[in-house]
Amino acid sequence: QVQLVESGGELVQPGGSLRLSCAASGRTLSNYAMGWFRQAPGKEREFVAAISRSGTNTRYADSLKGRFTISRDNAKNTVYLQMNVLKPEDTAVYYCAADRTLNSILVQTTTTQYDYWGQGTQVTVSS
């Protein structure tokens, strides 16, 4: 079983940038496809970005393309989410998730396809 811990969330002004990190322990991160999701108050958890085990494939929510970038460093057992030009509507708790798949190029976009979740990190975009 893999344990996931997110970090990097904080209060940032509109137009600013943040980089979230998701550190894994207990298992080698290279065995998992990874994803980022977010949940705003009163809303359902939504897909943000995903990356395959190999790192060769990525996918993003259409509304976030060009502003967010997902990456991974398997040697550091860490996945990142770089967020640029942040907007107030990006305010949410951001979660990373791990998919225990044998497919090295698969990316997943729905919550039910992931096996493990972190506790989340709060991102607040406000002036």
Image: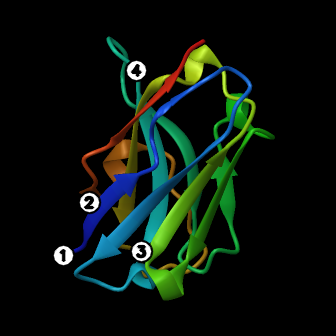
Disc 4 versus disc 2: nearer the observer: 4
| Whether residue 28 is situated above or below residue 81 in the rendered picture | below
Q: Which of these two is toward me, 10 or 35?
A: 10
In space, the residues marked 1 and 4 are separated at their CA atoms by 28 Å
Q: Residue furthest left?
A: 1
Task: Compare marks 1 and 4 and give the one earlier in the sequence.
Answer: 1
How far apart are the two marked residues, 1 and 2, measured between alpha carbons?
Answer: 8 Å
- Image-based side of 56 in relation to 76, left or right: right
Q: Which residue is mark 1?
A: 1
Above or below, 108 relative to 57: above
Rounded to the nearest angstrom, the CA distance separating label 3 from label 1 is: 11 Å
Name the residue tied to disc 3.
32
Amino acid of disc 1 = Gln
Q: CA distance from mark 4 to mark 2?
A: 20 Å
Q: Where is residue 14 shown, x and y percent of the image? A: 68, 20
For disc 2, the marked residue is 116
- Circle 4 residue: 40
